[in-house]
């Protein structure tokens, strides 16, 4: 730290992204990326747009917001485009939390929530998930006035909270915002988008990173009633009006125009997930009931970190978290059927040779 660093940030512990090592070619099952490349029309859209990169991108992202509107049956003024959904989450902490409106989220969830809370000086409460890693909606109903952040399906457990429970939380206090982070919903959950017309306090955050093969393009969006979106636009226009670059905007639009291909890929991933979960269970793993594009699993005979290390030595990367409640587990991104065969074969070998 330099002596110039602002005191208000001196104690920050930044979010640690999954490793992207360069020392060798790994089978990357650690950051929930799609195993499929973007659709050719999407790559072509970026190429065409790059020829106009001397010009700023559209600060209103209108064409993309219209495409989202057409895809999901919402009005463009109910949509904000963001530089990865992480940006929408940060904007939500900025816009809807303060000393009088602390944040609340589960103890086991996306690791960026506490980082954004601290970055923005927002007090927060972490509510323990039940022993089976499910959310009890009554925990949130019992904390009116606190802005709720829920990943649904949750990460890193993959467990989906039924829509009735999301609605219960949104309805429990119309005076606080409920942010539902649906990064993985295309793989199996049910979106809370259908609730937006009835709840002024509901914000649904989505990303192109996982289900649309665009993690490296950095694109997400959030949907809510127009007044809520206008607040986020105030924050966006006060930080970076050109937050999404023109290549990415064009890719996002082309991606939505070919969304059947993306959704088909999600179905394939979901099927491979089921096969992989079954293979792991037959090897003695406990596997959570995941509706996402990753598995969360532990084995009675080997610790989470030991398995992570042994897989890495074999060229396979998974994600291990050292939080006490989940340190026996690993989070395993689901790739292609072939990649997952490689993965399960490596796991079998490791279990057979405990040395
Ligand atoms: C991956 C992920 C995000 C962030 O996605 P980007 O759009 O790439 O910023 C947000 N929330 C959860 C739960 C995620 O896993």
Image: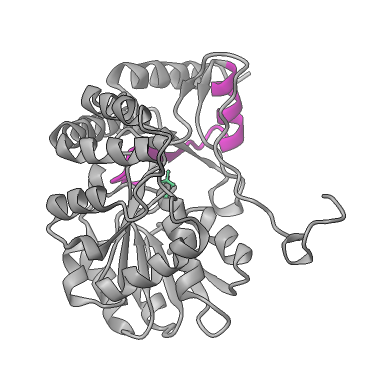
Q: How many labels does the image show?
A: 0
Query: Which of 234 and 220 lies nearest the eye of the viewer?
Result: 234
Q: Residue furthest right?
A: 3
Query: Which of 311 and 190 lies nearest the eye of the viewer?
Result: 190
Q: Which residue is drawn at 60% across and 19% down?
A: 22
Query: Which of 152 and 6 lies nearest the eye of the viewer?
Result: 6
> In the displayed structure, does residue 232 sit left or right of residue 107?
left
Name the quadrant containing residue 310: top right
Query: Which of 53 and 74 lies nearest the eye of the viewer?
Result: 53
Residue 126 lies, in percent from the top left, at 53, 68
Query: Does residue 253 appear in this view?
Result: yes
Q: Is residue 232 shown in magenta?
A: no
What residue span does the magenta drawing correspond to? Answer: 288-313
Q: Residue at x 33, y 85 (%)?
A: 173
Query: Does residue 285 appear in this view?
Result: no
| Relative vertical location of residue 236 with respect to residue 32 in this rendering, above or below | below
| Relative vertical location of residue 303 with respect to residue 355 in this rendering, above or below | below
């Amino acid at each position: 730290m330099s002596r110039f660093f602002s005191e208000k940030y001196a104690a920050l512990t930044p979010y640690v992204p999954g490793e992207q090592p360069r020392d060798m070619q790994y089978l990357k099952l650690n950051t929930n990326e799609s195993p499929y490349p973007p659709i050719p029309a999407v790559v072509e859209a970026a190429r065409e747009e790059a020829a106009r990169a001397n010009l700023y991108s559209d600060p209103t992202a209108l064409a993309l917001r219209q495409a989202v509107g057409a895809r999901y049956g919402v009005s463009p003024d109910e949509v904000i485009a963001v530089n990865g959904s992480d940006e929408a989450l940060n904007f939500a902490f900025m816009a809807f939390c303060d000393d009088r409106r602390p944040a609340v989220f589960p103890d086991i969830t996306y690791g960026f929530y506490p980082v954004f809370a601290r970055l923005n000086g927002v007090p927060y409460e972490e509510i323990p998930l039940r022993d089976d890693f499910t959310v009890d909606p009554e925990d949130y109903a019992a904390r009116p006035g606190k802005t709720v952040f829920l990943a649904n399906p949750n990460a890193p457990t993959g467990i989906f909270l039924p829509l009735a429970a999301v609605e219960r939380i949104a309805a429990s206090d119309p005076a606080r915002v409920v942010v539902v982070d649906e990064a993985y919903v295309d793989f199996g959950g049910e979106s809370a988008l259908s609730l937006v017309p009835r709840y002024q306090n509901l914000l649904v955050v989505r990303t192109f990173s996982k289900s649309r093969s665009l993690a490296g393009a950095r694109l997400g969006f959030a949907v809510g009633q127009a007044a809520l979106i206008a607040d986020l636009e105030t924050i966006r226009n006060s930080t970076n009006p050109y937050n999404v670059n023109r290549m990415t905007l064009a890719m996002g639009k082309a991606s939505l125009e070919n969304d059947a291909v993306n959704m088909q890929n999600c179905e394939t991933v979901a099927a491979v997930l089921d096969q992989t979960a079954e293979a792991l269970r037959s090897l003695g793993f406990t596997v959570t009931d995941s509706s996402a594009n990753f598995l969360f699993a532990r084995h009675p005979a080997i610790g989470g970190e030991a398995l992570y290390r042994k897989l890495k030595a074999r060229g396979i990367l998974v994600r291990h978290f050292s939080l006490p409640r989940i340190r026996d587990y690993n989070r395993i991104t689901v790739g292609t059927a072939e990649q997952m065969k490689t993965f399960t074969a490596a796991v079998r070998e490791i279990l057979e040779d405990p040395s």
